[in-house]
Image (cartoon, rainbow, N blue to C red):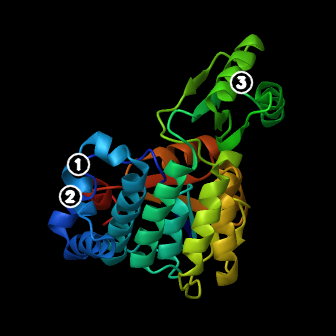
Amino acid sequence: MSTTAFIFPGQGSQYPGMGKDLAETFPVARQTFEEADDALGLKISGICFSGSEDELKLTANTQPAILTASIAVLRVVEQETGLKADFLAGHSLGEYSALVASGSFAFADAVRTVRARGTFMQEAVPVGTGTMAAMLSIEKDELEDICREAAQGEVVSAANFNSPGQIVIAGNVGAVNRAIEIAKARGFRKSMLLPVSAPFHCALMKPAADRLSATLDAVQLSEMLLPVVANATAAPNNDRLQVKPLLVTQVCAPVLWEQSVLNMAALGVTRFVEIGPGKVLSGLVKRISKEVEAANIADLDGLKAHQG
């Protein structure tokens, strides 16, 4: 018996047309998009199926769009394949998809919450004030030292521990650029600014965390049917009462993705299936652990590979 984790993508995995072939083929997928449209009073289905890249890139659109596409894939997978999860996890925004999959977060509530979350994150920092950069081949301790030197009274810190040799930093534009220059001076030449609209998972997101906390207060959660490995702790959580504090912490805390995957592998997970658009996470899993199997299901082709 292989132990399986379903993992759900975060921001950056979106693409125009995502979910369209599944919605045209399976009523359960089409109904998922309709449910999201109703919950938001907005045609998020249209943005997913035929929106422009720029429209999809707006954080307030990206987050509900990826969540909806991911849950549409999940429901088709549950209906059409024998795949079952033992653990769930998601990268940043993907943690909400994982919580829907766990039965704790009602889908309509999750869609509304992540639309608000996207808006809060966008508004927390004026456009052009903050940024993020991928720093390659630098060890955690050295990178923390580089960030300390680069800060000079501004914010710059690790935002995502994605895989061995891939850590993303976030903060004020000046501080992030200084960190890249200091890294280069130390011989680390591989770093690049990311095309993001805000500096996620750092202290600059505190206003967003406070607003999200108030939004989550109004949401009713159910008992969790499966454990969700939280970004902020890299540990499985089964306790419904911990969900909201973990989601609020997550806004300003780094995403411990590498540690989450290693912890799931240590708990016996041998197969990771990425559910939703793109294949970013399955790619990271392959880099984190050579011992486990990683696959992704984003569309009809991915589904067919798992229907046998």
Relative to the observer, which residue lies in front, 291 or 219?
219
Relative vertical location of residue 35 with respect to residue 158 in this rendering, above or below: below
Badge number at residue 51: 1
Q: Are marks 2 and 1 in contact (CB under 8 Å)?
A: yes
Residue 23 in which image quadrant: bottom left
| Helix, strand or loop for disc 1 | loop
**What's the amino acid at mark 2?**
Gly
Q: Which mark is residue 9?
A: none
Looking at numbered disc 3 in the image, what kind of residue is underneath it?
A: Ala
For residue 182, side relative to residue 291 (left or right): right
Q: Considering only vertical position in the picture, is 137 above or below 67?
A: above
Sequence-wise, the earlier of marks 1 and 3 is 1
Q: For mark 2, what is the residue?
A: 46
Q: Position of residue 181 (x, y in %)?
A: 69, 16
- Relative to 10, residue 221 above or below: below
Can you see residue 161? yes
